[in-house]
Amino acid sequence: MTDTDNLTMNTQSTRYSLSATILLIALLSFFEAEILTGSTSVEGILQYPVSFLAGLAFYGFQVAIIADISARYSLKLGTIYILGLIYGILEEGISIFTMEATGTHELWLTTYGLNLTWTIYVMMLHAVITVITTLFILRVIWPEILQNPILSRRNYMIIIPATIVIYYFLMVASISAGRVPGILPVFLLILLLLLLIFAAWKNSLPAREEIEKLSTQAEYGVLIPFAAGMILPFIFGNRLPVLLVPETLALLLLMIYLFQYFSKFGTIVEMKRKSLWAFSSIILIIMLIGGSFNRTVPSDVVAIIVSVILILYGYMRVSGIQ
């Protein structure tokens, strides 16, 4: 059975509801960005269930919009990567202010009121983990998704206001917690946001270049520098201040390199699902290892079980594809 045959058969199957689609997107993106990294613990979810539900909506709505846009305009992977960088700024810089240096929150190299090292780091994390890996896993376990837009105009009329409300409460909560950003870093982030929006638009224009296939194991070599970029900064951190500048420059180069790498490929639908499975499985393993120092024991158990299920179920879904 070929990949095309599999797609044809699945297209004729029963369609899932929109709510199930968004819920799946929310669960995957929240798991990868929060549980795998240790940013949110299982204990925290049980203790604050309302915050957990708000977090699911926060991730689900925004990544669903990116998924819809990518299908609606047949966006190439490089453009989706830029949208992931934009998402990173919106979440970390505009809603919860972790990118800005405040009296209660400083991370690594700080300049012009920005946690510069963290800003670059977390933009990449959200672009690759929260957005791209989520969409890859979706395509692996649900073949027909992303071939067509998943949201209607009416859906947007509900999702966008709901997301704005969540942003408002997250901003209020962050300010109440003492993370009050200065005007300059917010201005710099907005400027960067506008530049990335322009870059995403520019990159989405039709091009004549031949696209490559993510089909050989050698092409997964990009995951080695990505793994180093996700893990090493936490190992060195502020322990060796002399390394902060080269660390930050290395992360910036990695962010640019990842864009060049992802730009070699076409749309997610054009890519082989076996390759998407291999790539996303390696990402899950990297984050399992890299986030282990930051996770609690219950979170470790959940992270391992869910990752193994995703990897094995994904393998079952693509094992018959030639």
Image: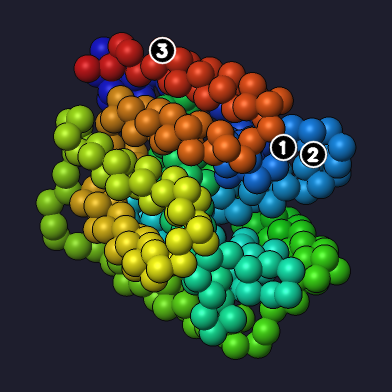
Can residue 86 be seen here? The reply is no
Q: CA distance from mark 1 to mark 2?
A: 5 Å
Q: Closer to the camera, 156 or 236?
A: 236
Helix, strand or loop at mark 2: helix
> Does residue 81 appear in this view?
yes
Quadrant housing residue 88: bottom right
Decide which of 41, 153 is in the foreground and name it: 41
- Of callouts 3 and 2, the N-terminal one: 2
Residue under label 3, please give it: 316
Q: Is 39 on the left or on the right of 230, as rendered?
A: right
Which residue, given by chain and number where applicable, does mark 2 sit on? 44
Marking on residue 196: none
Residue depth check, mark 3 versus mark 1: number of the one nearer the observer: 1
Task: Give the farthest residue toward the bottom.
Answer: 184
* Image point (56%, 53%), residue name: 65
Report the residue at 62% width, 73% height from top. 100
Q: Is residue 292 left or right of residue 82?
A: right
Identify residue type, mark 3: Met
Looking at the picture, the colour scheme in use is rainbow
Cα gap from disc 3 to disc 1, whole angstroms: 29 Å
For badge 2, the amino acid type reads Gly
Amino acid at pointer 1: Ser
Residue 132 appears at what percent x and percent y? 43, 45
Q: Nearer the viewer, residue 170 or 321?
A: 170
Pick the quarter of the image with the C terminus. top left
Q: Pointers 3 and 1 in contact (CB under 8 A)?
A: no
- Against 180, is 241 above or below? above
Query: What residue is pinned by disc 1?
Result: 41
Of tags 3 and 2, the one toward the viewer is 2
Q: Circle 1 sits in a helix, a strand or a loop, which is it?
A: loop
Q: Position of residue 142 (x, y in %)?
A: 47, 27
